[in-house]
Each structure stands twice: as C-alpha cells, then as structure tokens.
Amino acid sequence: MFTSDQIHRIGRFLIRLSLAAVLMMFAFLSLLAGGFVGDTVATLIPGLLAIGLILIGDSRLPWAAIPVAAVSLLTTLFTGSLDVPPTPAMWLAESGALLILTLWTIRLWSARLGRTAVGLLIAALLLLPLRLGVTSSLAGMLFSEIVIMFGLAVAVVWGLYLRSIDVRRQRALANVQRSERIELARDLHDFVAHHVTGIVVQAQAAQYIPATDHAKVTESFAAIEKAGVEALASMRRLVGILRDDDAGGGSRPLGDLDQLRTLVERFNVGEVYASLYLSPEFSAATTPPEISATLYRVAQEALTNIRKHSHHVATVSVVVSGGADSVEIAIRDDGQPGGHRSRLASLGGGYGLAGLSERLTALGGSLTAGPRPEGGWEVIGRVPTTGPDGRWESAAGIRRRPPKTMEST
C-alpha cells in the first residue's frame, strides 16, 4: 500500500508527465510543418529545454528557469537570420511551457533569484510574437501578442493564488509554533518555579538544624543540590526545545504518571508527609498523554502553592480517581490559617492556577481551588476522558469523592 505522501508525489509526477507529453506533441507537429532542417530544430531548443524543466518539476526553480528564459530571448533576437517559416505554430509548445514555468516561478517569488526568473520569463513570452518577422502582417503579430498576454494573465493570477495559499499555510504554521513556544515558556516558568521553591524551603529548614547534627546537615545540602540539578535539567531541556525551529507538540517534555509519583516523593521534606493514591485503572502506559500531562501540571502547581502559601502543613494527599467519563485529581493539605506572609509568597504570582484553569476548560474540564471545611486547602482538577468517537467529551458533572484508603509513595 502507498502512503498518502507517496500518492501525492506520484500524482504530481503524472501531471507533469501529461503536460510535457502535450507540449512535446505540439513541438513534433511544429517540426513536421517546418521540416527536419537545422534552423527549424534550432527554434525548438528553448521549448524543449522548458519542457524538460517541467518534467523535472519545480524543485529546480527558480534558478533553472533563468537560463531557459535567456535561451528563448536569444532565439527571438536571432530568429531573423534563420530560414524558418514565420508561423505561430513554431513556438506554440515553447509558449505553453514558458507559461507553466511562469506560474510555478511566481509561486516562488520570495525565493532567491525568484523575481529575476519571473522577469525574464515574462519578457521571453511578450517578445515571442517578434519571431513572425517583418513578413507577417501587423494584425497577425497583434493577435499573437493578445493571445500571449491572455495566457500570461491567467498564469500570473493562478500563480499568485497558489502563492497566497502557501503564505497562509506558512502563517498558520508560524502561529502554531508561536503558540507552542508561549506554552513552553509557561512550562519553563512552572518547572523552574517549582524546583526553586523547593530549594528555598529546604534552605529555610536547614537554618533550624543544629550545627552538631552533621547527618541532618549533610542530608539537607544533598536535597538542595538534587533540587538544583533537577531545576537546571528542566530549564536546559525546555530552552533547548525553544531554540529548535522545528519544535512541535510531539517534542514537548510532558509529565506522566510515573513522574507524578516522583514529584510527590520529592515533596517529603522535613516534617511534611506527602502521599499519592492512583486508582488501579490508571497507569503511565494506558493513560492518554493529554490527561497524564494535565494531571501532572495540576499537581505541580498545587504543591508549589502549598510550599509558598500554606502554614504548619503536616500531611499532603494527592488522589487520582475517576470513572468512564472523567478523571479527577485532588490535592489536599492540612495547613492552618494565619501566620506571617512568607518571603516566597511576597514574590507574587497567581497566574499558575489561572493558566491551568484555562487549559482544563479548553479540554472540557474544570479546576476548583479553595479552603476545606475541616481546615487546609484543596485543589481539584477534572479532565474528561475521550469518547467512542475519539473526541473530548464533557464531564458527566458527578463529583466523585476520593477513596479513604491512602497509599504512600
């Protein structure tokens, strides 16, 4: 079986072959009318070159069209010294081939030498009627010029239309790449902010370790070093993708459920105990990347906010549950209200949850955040699963409470 790309290439070659065959038929008829003599064959050279370029395709344009147009102009210039019957049929194949090359070259107007090639091709076409010579009537030359100009107008308009399609496609691709880069920049902020927040929290905790407890001091510095290395690795990976002109959605370093486990494990710092519960039906291998990446981002932002804003947190629970129509992630802590405003909180922010809310809404889900009646804070994100038709479905609207059993990671 042929792929769609192979079918497209074969179709384009068959079209070029058909055009070249029709033009070669005109050239052969012209050769029969003028006779197999040297001068007649000489006038067919520009047309044969143009037909050969059509058969090769537009991959050699626009630079290959320049010598073809130059040969046509030289043939027109010296046609008066050739013993050739002054009939338009002699350059019918040549004019058709030059019109096709003009159409293709206008499409490549912005390419290097594109404007030069277009100018030479148009000049060669407009001067073709001069080959009729002084022996032809003025009316015949004028009629031939009108026919050439009509064909040239059609070629120019068609070429400009194809060029506009190419420009729109390029702009659409550029917009997609720009949107992806903006999203990657947001990811860069979230990744680095998460790791740097952990470094600051661990450094603050290290200040209260007695100087004589060398084991605790060594453990604290090791945790700070690990968080710093992870921050540099995340930043280097994302910046590398931003520098790549061909970066797309497929190359984006999305988080998955295995990374979610690691994320929760790293949150166990000092007296804070973090746990993760995953419903049995969810795994890194079976969960769609759109869902697992969104769950990871919600957990990352929520845990970062706990470090920044919560006070006296002892336990943090991350629960991933759901059913056939939606997946829910809930991050809850037992922090107490009040307390002084930390230096991390004073740095500002507040855009992470807003961005995540927009992301989940775009997927048909929702994000809620607020205080718990029993104390602490909770963030709940809900993502709809894919339906039978493969498209995103809206969540059923039923809030599933997470199971009470917790599994430590």
Image (cartoon, helix red, strand yellow):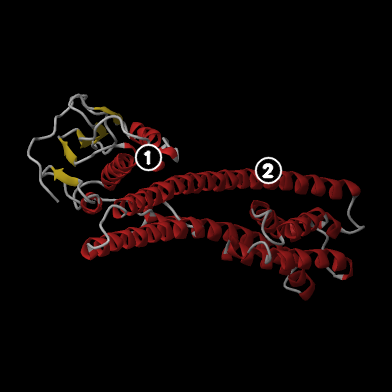
Residue that protrudes farthest toward the bottom in the picture: 38
**Rendered position, 199 above or below 186:** below
Tell me the tag on residue 253. Answer: none
Question: Which tag is nearer the camera, tag 2 or tag 1?
Answer: 1
Compared to residue 188, the image places residue 23 above or below, namely: below
Q: Quadrant of the N terminus?
A: bottom left
Percent across and percent down for residue 67 are 73, 68
Place of residue 21 in the rendered image (x, y in percent of width and height, measured from the top left): 57, 61
What percent of the width, then of the height, locates residue 355?
40, 36
Q: Secondary structure at mark 2?
A: helix
**Quadrant of residue 224 within the rendered picture:** bottom left
Task: Tell me the amino acid under the disc marked 2.
Answer: Val
Say few, some or many: other residues with alpha carbon within 10 Å of mark 1 (under 14 / 14 to 19 / 20 or more). few
* Residue 391 vs residue 217, the one in the foreground: 217
- The residue pinned by badge 1 equals 342
Q: Which residue is mark 2?
A: 157
Mark yes or no: residue 388 visible: no
Residue 217 visible at all: yes
